[in-house]
Amino acid sequence: MDILVCIKQVPGTSKVEVDPVTGVLKRDGADTKMNPYDLYALEAALTMKEEKGGKVKVISMGPPQAMDVIREAYMMGADEGSLVSDRKFAGADVLATAYTISQGVRKMAPYDIILCGKQTTDGDTAQVGPEMAEYLGIPHIANVIDIIEIKDKSIVVAMDMPNTIEKIEVSYPCLLTLEKDINQPRLPSYKKGIETKDREIKTISLKDFEDQNEKRYGLNGSPTQVERIFPPVHDIKREKFEGSGDEVARQIADKLKELKFV
């Protein structure tokens, strides 16, 4: 079974700088980590490999330093990894990102199933996985909370809907986006880190794609533009109320009304 997992390097802190011109995050030199949601997808892939055999491949999109998360995936048990990286991909919105990764996925074929985390902590759109599947022309299921049965030609999963839990069977090849708490991700292995420290990470750039039209990628290929992005402002104010219980309660009520909380 060939399993492909999409992983991403995200900021490890909320204290990140923003490019005032392009409105995108400045990732160079910032503390980073693997997107937490992707850890669940990777764990699911490794568990499926242990149950059914096969190979786990990972793909990431980003600058060269994003190879660090692929190395981490190797330390957890992934077999192969590729980084989709090219300066022409910079500034991509979710649609351009999905198209770019889908082009990279085509270079990593064959695959039976693609697993993605529900969303990323730096974007929180939860759109890239399903959009990738549409570009690849394969069925997809989002909000997967349980992998019920892995069959030879299909997989049965539980999907979390607003008011119900639905059981669905989908044929390969397909794409799933996984919710957190579907499993408990394993820790990276120091031993595997030593064993895989020289393992190849392939770099895929625009010249390797089937579609090399630069207008489909990066800022040029993004139909949406960020108007403004900024770090959260930490503005903590304290106010002390004194008096009897009734007086303090009245002051708190008046303050909540003033702040329009009630």
Image (cartoon, rainbow, N blue to C red):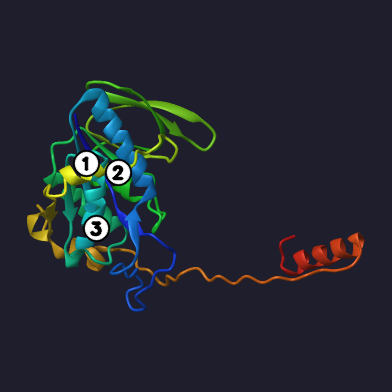
**Mark 2, mark 3: which one is toward the viewer?**
2
Q: Amino acid at mark 1?
A: Lys
Q: Is residue 47 above or below residue 180?
A: above
Residue highlighted by disc 2: 188
Secondary structure of residue under mark 2: loop
Query: In the image, is residue 55 above or below residue 93?
Result: above
Of the 4 image quadrants, the one containing the N terminus is top left
Residue 111 visible in the displayed image:
yes
At label 3, the amino acid type is Ala
Q: Position of residue 136 (x, y in %)?
A: 21, 43
- Label 3, secondary structure: give it: helix
Percent across and percent down for residue 147 are 37, 28
Specify whether 259 is left or right of 164: right
Q: Residue furthest bottom?
A: 21
Q: Quadrant of residue 173?
A: top left
Q: Disc 2 residue type? A: Pro
Q: CA distance from mark 3 to mark 1?
A: 19 Å
- Above or below: residue 80 compared with residue 253: above
| CA–CA distance in space, label 2 to label 3 | 17 Å
Q: Which mark is residue 66?
A: 3
- Give the residue number, with chain letter if any, for mark 1: 192
